[in-house]
Each structure stands twice: as structure tokens, then as C-alpha cells.
Image (tube, helix red, strand yellow):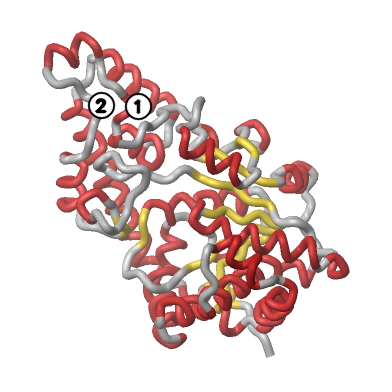
Amino acid sequence: MAIVDPWGSELVEDYEKLIKGFGLAHFNPDSLPNPNRLMRRQVTFASQDLNSIADAIKNKKPYYALTGIMPTADKLHLGNKMVIETVKYFQDHGAKTYILIADLEALSTRGVSLEESKKRALNFHIPAYIALGLDPKRTLFYFQSDNKDVIKIANDAARRITLNEFRAVYGTAEPGRILAATNQVGDMVFPQLEQRMPGVIPVGFDQSPHLRLARDYIRRAKEKKFILLSSIYNKFTPSLDGGFKMSKSKPESVIELPEDINSVSKKIKKALTGGRDTLEEQRKLGAVIEKDMVFELLKQHLVEDDKELNKIYDDYKSGKMLSSEIKEIACEKMAKFMNDFSKKLEKSKKQVDKLKFIKWT
């Protein structure tokens, strides 16, 4: 069972291992201006070379933020939501923003055709990213297969990285994975062809090997004078049954976007909480919030106002609030979020033909 740190003041052992193992820094919310909800509550827990980004924001220097879409799934998950919220933060603080559609990766690793990837991206994934807060007027989109610069950088990276090094990063060296990884190097670096500037890549930890490979490539391609990439990492949203992260292998403990609110409510009501065994114990001792998946859902996704979250925390911790009550709060807020997301999704679908897609001749 996962142990959740409700305020981010300490990290569970799993996250400490990740920080030490990958040579990262503990994220400091004070390092960036006006930190967003994830940053304030230290759901954002680690970063790498973020000083260059903080300097660019402070001194209004050019920099970019980039993330991608893997157009294979029919729905998004809460991890996608957190990445977009992080990208939006940097977009709101002056970053030139890029969203790539990884159609070449979908082809080489998942067998999804370029045509199908394009259809899925335009019909769902791109509108969903906009519905989650991305500003379409300030975002540049492109498909990997259209980006000649990405392909050129990928080929140069493939020339400089050895097979043993690739195995050390990924643990395997399948041709499709090599192609996908070098294309991702190209994605992360290509904005610097137009202008050498810092770039920040918000990633989940499962994507960190791609960033490691890109940084290794930049160090070796010194003559190109690329600036070393920065990164920022969010914690996983725990599984509703108490697992370290939500996983599709346990659909009853995963919340998808979009999802029918009745389905989501049933999952929340079955979620693991830190409530005591009896009403008497709960009133006397209060909840063990460190083990409560519903409070974590509120903290990461559903309660924007810190004062409101503090009150829920205090009431639940003191025994004034019961597990059934915190679940009811989560169900109500999730219903509001899902309804809002669905409306924005339908509106965003009508904007796709007006988006800025980078073109290559």
C-alpha cells in the first residue's frame, strides 16, 4: 500500500530513490514565481537544471516548454492532466509552447498507422489538451512524421549513441524502441534550431529515460551548441486501492478522462481511506490521512483553494469529518470537473481547424 504524504513535506522512499538514482534535485516551490497548485503542494517533487528556466521567466528571456501526445489510447488519465497543467504554467509565464503528436512512435512501438494517429489526435487528443487548459492561440502543434528537423536530429543522435549505452538507459534495444527514442530526442531539441534557448520538458517518471538520452546527445553534439534541457516531475496519482500509481491493469481503481460520473463515483466510494474501523474511533482519533487516497485526489486534482483544502484536512484529521463525508465531497467535485471537461472538449473540437500546425516544405 502506498503511503501518501498529504503536504509534500517528506517524500516516500520510492520517490527519494528516484531522485538519487537519476541525479535530480528536490523541487522548491519558491524557485518559480506564483507556483501553481501542483507546485505549491509539492505534488511537483523533483526537477533538473531548472535555474535556467527560472532565470528566463524572471528576466523575460526566450525559452520553450514541450510535451507530446501518444495517439493510441481512447481516453486520457489524470497523469496527462497534471502534465498539461504544468505546461500551462510555463505557457502563462512566457514559454513558447510546443505540442507534438508522436505518430512515428505510435507506428514503431504500437503498430498504429500514421493515418489512424492523425485521426485520433485531431478528433480527441488535441481537443482534450485544450479542454484541460492549454491556450490554442499560443501553442504550436506538429506531427512527428511531418517534422523534417526532428528526423534529422534523430538520425544524428542515432549516430552518436552506442547500442550498449542505449541498453543501459532502456534495458532493451529493440529496433522500434530505438527509433522511437531517437525521434523523441529530436522532438525535445528541435525548437533550438530556430533559436538557442533553454527548454523545459514536464514528464512523468516513466518518460525520464528519453530525457536522459536527449541530455547525453546534447553533451556529445557540442559543436551544435544546444542548451542542456531542463525537466520537472510530478508525483503519480495513487491508485484508488492504495497502489503507488493508477494502472490500467486495475480499471476499478483508475479514473479516465472523460468518464461517466456514475462510474467514477462508484470507484471513489470504494476507494481506500484513512478512516478508522469504527465511528467512535474516527471521532476520537481522526483519520490517518497519510493512507487516504480520496484526500490525495482532492489535493492533486479537485480542490484549487488552499484554505478550503486546509479545512478539509483539519476536519478529517480531528475526527470532525468521516470517510463517507470526504468521499461525498470528492464525488461532487469530480462531477463538476467531468461536466466542465466534457463541455470544454466539445467546444475545443470545433477549434481544431484553426490551430497553428508547423509546416515543412
Q: Quadrant of the C terminus?
A: bottom right
Asked where in the image residue 298 lies, by quadrant, the reply is top left
Q: Amino acid at mark 2?
A: Gly
| Residue 36 higher or lower than 357, as above or below | above
Q: Is residue 180 left or right of residue 60?
A: left
Residue that appears at 28% across and 13% down: 318
Q: Is residue 293 left or right of residue 183?
A: left
Q: How far apart are the two marked residues, 1 and 2, measured between alpha carbons?
A: 7 Å
Q: Amino acid at mark 1?
A: Glu
Q: Is residue 271 left or right of residue 190?
A: left
Question: What residue did someone put label 1 on?
Answer: 290
**Furthest-top residue in view?**
284
Q: Nearer the viewer, residue 357 or 279?
A: 279
Q: Nearer the viewer, residue 3 or 268?
A: 3
The answer to whether residue 37 is visible is no
x then y, percent, for residue 160: 74, 73
| Residue 4 higher or lower than 110, as above or below | above
Question: What residue did someone put label 2 on?
Answer: 274
**Are the residues at dot 1 and dot 2 in contact (C-beta closer than 8 Å)?**
yes
Residue that appears at 23% across and 56% down: 251
Q: Circle 1 — which element?
A: helix
The answer to whether residue 313 is visible is yes
Q: Within 10 angstroms of label 1, few (less than 14), some, or many (20 or more) residues? A: some
Q: Quadrant of the N terminus?
A: top left
Q: Is residue 38 left or right of residue 159?
A: left
Which sits earlier in the primary sequence, circle 1 or circle 2?
Answer: 2
Residue that appears at 36% across and 32% down: 3
| Residue 205 higher or lower than 172, as above or below | above
x then y, percent, for residue 260: 20, 57
Asked where in the image residue 59 lies, by quadrant, the reply is top right
| Residue 259 higher or lower than 240, as above or below | below
